[in-house]
Image (tube, rainbow, N blue to C red):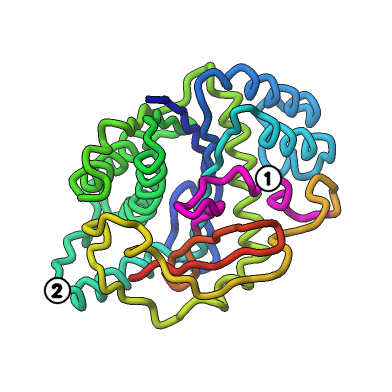
């Protein structure tokens, strides 16, 4: 079984999802075979040289055209290809999501047991965020039969993040669809010195996705069913086939995903240049996960740069 590495970094107005409507929080991850470490690290160091900052951030790359070009080329040119994962939650999304989930639990006839986090009240919204994040990683690893070691940029609460992530993987490992997936998914903790250059690339990805939703999110939020959706197959992970228990398509967009000429300074975001590297759905469309301002969650499924669909998850 192939083993891959996922290197995560976050971006936002705070380092956790917040409860105010003006905030935003997101993560980005580069997922790759171990033998890509050296080439990704060299590319990252070259980007650092271009922006004259070895510990560069998204804004450094965003404002440097050669660095933008190299970032896009690095993501696209590896063989076998790297994969990308991103999840952005707008404003108080996760606070509203908790409220929506509690109401939906009553409809489903299930007890809602997550009033607060065992890691403290301040971690409750992060727990909810990690629940969705972990499910995406688990689904892809299980569906494609590979093992994955997960690393995150250095932060003081990594033990709490690991505990939350492991709890969710354990729960999913007990479901019919993802039986024993916990044997494949390992949250290792902070990035090693060897992986540190790669986490800078993850930070650029996270920043670009944050910027994408800040700029283009209104195109997505307006297409969602604001009343929420109830899933007749609940809990959905008791269903073997994901197409019978997946999110609902609420809109298909026949327009450019993001800005043209993504490597140029005139483009606000770079997404149009690297979207083909995102993790794929069972129907082989590229996925980006999002949380809307009122607590609705979903995925963008990208067929090509000018045709993409918005899928809404049930409450």
Span of residues in magenta: 267-289
How far is disc 2 from disc 1 in space, using C-alphas?
A: 43 Å
Q: Residue 173 placed where, x, y %? A: 23, 43
Q: Residue 133 placed where, x, y %? A: 40, 49
The quadrant in which residue 259 appears is bottom right
Per the rendering, the mark at residue 109 is: 2
User: Would residue 45 appear left or right of 98 to someone viewing this image?
Assistant: right
Q: Is residue 268 magenta?
A: yes
The front one of 173 and 186 is: 173
Q: Earlier in the sequence, mark 2 or mark 1?
A: 2
User: Would residue 71 appear left or right of 224 to someone viewing this image?
Assistant: right
Q: As displayed, is residue 138 above or below residue 104? A: above
Crowdedness near tag 2: few (<14), some (14–19) or many (≥20) residues, C-alpha within 10 Å: few
User: Which residue is painted at 80% across and 44% down in the image?
Assistant: 63
Helix or strand or loop: what does disc 1 sit on? loop
Helix or strand or loop: what does disc 2 sit on? loop
The front one of 42 and 234 is: 234
Q: Is residue 303 magenta?
A: no
The front one of 305 and 13 is: 305
> What residue would you read off at disc 1?
274
Q: As displayed, is residue 123 above or below residue 162? A: below
Q: Residue 220 placed where, x, y %? A: 58, 70
Q: As displayed, is residue 96 above or below residue 63? A: below
């Amino acid at each position: 079984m192939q083993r891959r590495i996922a290197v995560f970094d976050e971006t936002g107005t705070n380092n956790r999802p917040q409860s105010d409507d003006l905030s935003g929080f997101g993560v980005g991850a580069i997922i790759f075979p171990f033998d890509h470490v050296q080439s990704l690290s060299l590319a990252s160091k070259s980007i650092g040289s271009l922006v004259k900052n070895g510990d560069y951030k998204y804004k450094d790359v965003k404002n440097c055209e050669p660095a933008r070009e190299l970032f896009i080329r690095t993501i696209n040119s590896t063989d076998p290809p790297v994969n990308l994962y991103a999840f952005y939650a707008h404003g108080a999304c996760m606070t509203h999501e908790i409220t929506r989930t509690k109401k939906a639990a009553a409809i489903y006839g299930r007890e809602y047991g997550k009033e607060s986090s065992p890691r403290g009240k301040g971690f409750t919204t992060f727990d909810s965020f990690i629940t969705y994040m972990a499910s995406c990683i688990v689904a892809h690893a299980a569906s494609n039969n590979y093992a994955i070691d997960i690393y995150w940029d250095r932060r003081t609460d990594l033990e709490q993040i690991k505990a939350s992530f492991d709890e969710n993987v354990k729960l999913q490992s007990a479901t019919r669809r993802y039986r024993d997936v916990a044997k494949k998914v390992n949250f290792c903790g902070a990035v090693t010195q060897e992986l540190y250059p790669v986490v800078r690339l993850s930070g650029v990805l996270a920043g670009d996705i944050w910027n994408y939703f800040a700029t283009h999110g209104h195109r997505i939020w307006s297409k969602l069913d604001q009343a929420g959706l109830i899933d007749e197959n609940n809990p959905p992970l008791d269903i073997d086939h994901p197409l019978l228990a997946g999110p609902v398509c609420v809109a298909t967009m026949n327009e450019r995903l993001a800005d043209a000429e993504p490597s140029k300074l005139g483009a606000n975001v770079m997404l149009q240049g690297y979207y083909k590297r995102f993790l794929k759905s069972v129907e082989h469309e590229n996925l980006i996960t999002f949380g809307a301002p009122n607590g609705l969650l979903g995925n963008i499924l990208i067929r090509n740069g000018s045709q993409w669909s918005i899928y809404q998850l049930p409450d």
